[in-house]
Amino acid sequence: MSRPGEPDSRRQAWTTGEESMANFDKFGNLSRQGWSSGTATQIVRAGQEAHIGLWGGGPGGVDLVVKSADPTVCVVHEEPRPAAWPHWRHFLLTALRDGQTTVDARLPGSSNSWASMTVQVTGQAGVRLVFFPGERLQRSTTVGTIYVIGGGGESMTAAGGPPTGYKDPLQGGHTAEPTPAGHYVLGPRIHVTTAGWPYSVIPWGAGLRLTAAGEVEYEKLPRVWRRATGPHGDVTTAVLAFKRRSGLHPDVAAVTVQTRGVFVDPATGNLRSSVWEKNDFGRWGWNLRRNGQATAYYIHTTPEDEHATAQKKAVLLANSHGCIHLVPAERDRLMNAGYLKQGVPFEVRPYSETGPP
Amino acid sequence: MTRPRFLLIAAALLSLTAARAEAAESCSALEGRLDSQAAGLPLAADQSGEFRAIGDAALDAVKTCPHSERLWYLAARSAEVLDGASGGAAFAEGGGAKKIARQAAAQAPRSVAVATILARVDRTEQAARAAYDLDPHYAPARRALALALARQGSFDEARKLVTPAADAPDLTARATVLLAAGQPAEAAKEARKALKRPVPDATELSPTNEILRDANEVLGFALLAQGRAREALRVLAVAASTGSLAAQAELAKRRGSQPRRSPDARRP
């Protein structure tokens, strides 16, 4: 066999479609540490990563599907194709827990392996979470997965911001942007509030009540009530500011009526609900803290996904404005298992790392 | 007729009238509640979630208020908006956008708003013309007809329907017609004008980023048609991020055929 990366006659034959073959190996300056070419085995410590190349493809040069047989041990993501190394594809192996698995390259829709390698994960790692936001397109949403490293191989589906940022001029000056790659630490679990989004002024689950004057109050803290509606209510004020940031010139009286309509049924004069469940950050949120400082990014659910879960309907994740959207039931599962909690390291990987299929 | 029998009939009629009034009142209350929720749509961070909530509630409401044009509109429009975004999953229980739009049109045959939704999801000239004929002054119906005509190559008639184009929805429709007519440079010009103030038509319940999605999509394909691939892909990436399925498909196709340059090839 020729040295990796150097074409020989067999490899040239593949490019003309006369023959189809593939093999895992290292190309370029991918680290060979822990790699045995003879046995096609990569040894990697739990919590660490390794890079591997796949040379070749299926008949006619069709792309093979590369997948870990046991994704609780190790997951595989594809890096952007290396322009300098034709016919090579570049994969990232992320070791989640100790164990062994094969990684196979198969024809799409087939169970026949065209190339196979073994990954041995050794040792233990402290618990941390790693999020690959660009894994796949699910309908029109770019969806990824949060993997638990140092646990039992758990994972949960999540959606970050859109892969390309944009500014929607009618959304109160907010931008929608990719969740920035990097290393964070989870902040405490909180009911997120912000005046930047009018529905998030009030914490999720806060009690609501009508005053004698017919205005709505919300329980900001236990036994601390604040006015939500009326010309100077917190929500009215947030709506006015939101509209002004959207380049509009809102009429205070009209906004006051509109805001009241969010809480009170005009036909009956009664509260639509005695509990606030429209906060944009859902029931719980954890800030992604960086260098000891809070950032603008949270991991959280959405109100509609909370409601869909409560009604046993399908959850349809949507891309966020930069935060990370979770599926409520999966949030609960990882929260109860002790992985979603303050102090847990959280890594966001680049959107360019795609798969697994 | 005997006196007791007359009284019984009168009582029954009164009771029926009261029940009808009560139903009408509750339908009006339902419409008010959903209109109030719809008015708050731009304030929500997750607009697709809001559309789902409005659509689900409207579909529930039409069971008790089958003659409410407004509720049918909200149900059909929500299903239409989420159809692409959710791949039909959001309203699968209701039969999907096309079925809901057809039911809505059957229940509210004089509603130009509902007929326009049906025209857009059906994508036929016949449905678009039926909507337009209900009210030629309803701008979404006029645009739906222009796009249907452009799809089948009747470019002159299509162009007339979106000329002059002043607001972003008309400019976007005009750009789409021009691109279909093989005039990508003119299409790009109109799309860029739309993107200067990308505000959707207030007559329809729309996601606030609808024009960003549609105008970037047509601009991207117009640039591609002019051979300006690099610029086109940047624009299509924005369209894809705002939910354009056509832009997503184009980007995926190009990713498959054109390897992306990777700085990672030289690490670790």
Image (cartoon, coloured by chain):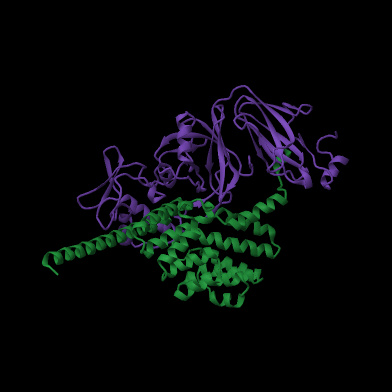
Q: Nearer the viewer, residue A104 or B99?
A: B99
Residue drawn at point x = 44 percent, y = 66 percent: B105
Residue farthest toward the right in the current orientation of the protein: A9
Q: Quadrant of the N terminus of chain A?
A: top right
Q: Quadrant of the C terminus of chain A?
A: top right
Residue A344 position in % (x across, y down):
50, 30
Q: Is residue B18 left or right of residue A23?
A: left
Residue farthest toward the left in the current orientation of the protein: B3
Residue drawn at point x = 78 percent, y = 29 percent: A37
| B22 in relation to B262, above or below | below
**In this figure, what is the number of numbered marks?**
0
Q: Nearer the viewer, residue B220 or A297?
A: B220
- Image colour for chain B is green
| A116 in relation to B90, above or below | above
| A140 in relation to B175, above or below | above
Q: Is residue A78 left or right of residue A165?
A: right
Tell me if I can see residue B163 in this picture: no
Q: Nearer the viewer, residue B180 or B219?
A: B180
Residue farthest toward the top in the current orientation of the protein: A123
Residue A320 position in % (x across, y down):
50, 47
Q: Nearer the viewer, residue B125 or B167?
A: B125
Residue B191 position in % (x across, y down):
58, 66
Tell me if I can see residue B223 in this picture: yes
Residue B40 position in % (x across, y down):
39, 56
Residue drawn at point x = 29 percent, y = 58 percent: B26
Quarter-wise, where is residue B112 in the image?
bottom left
Q: Which chain is purple?
A: A
Q: Is residue B160 left or right of residue A25?
A: left
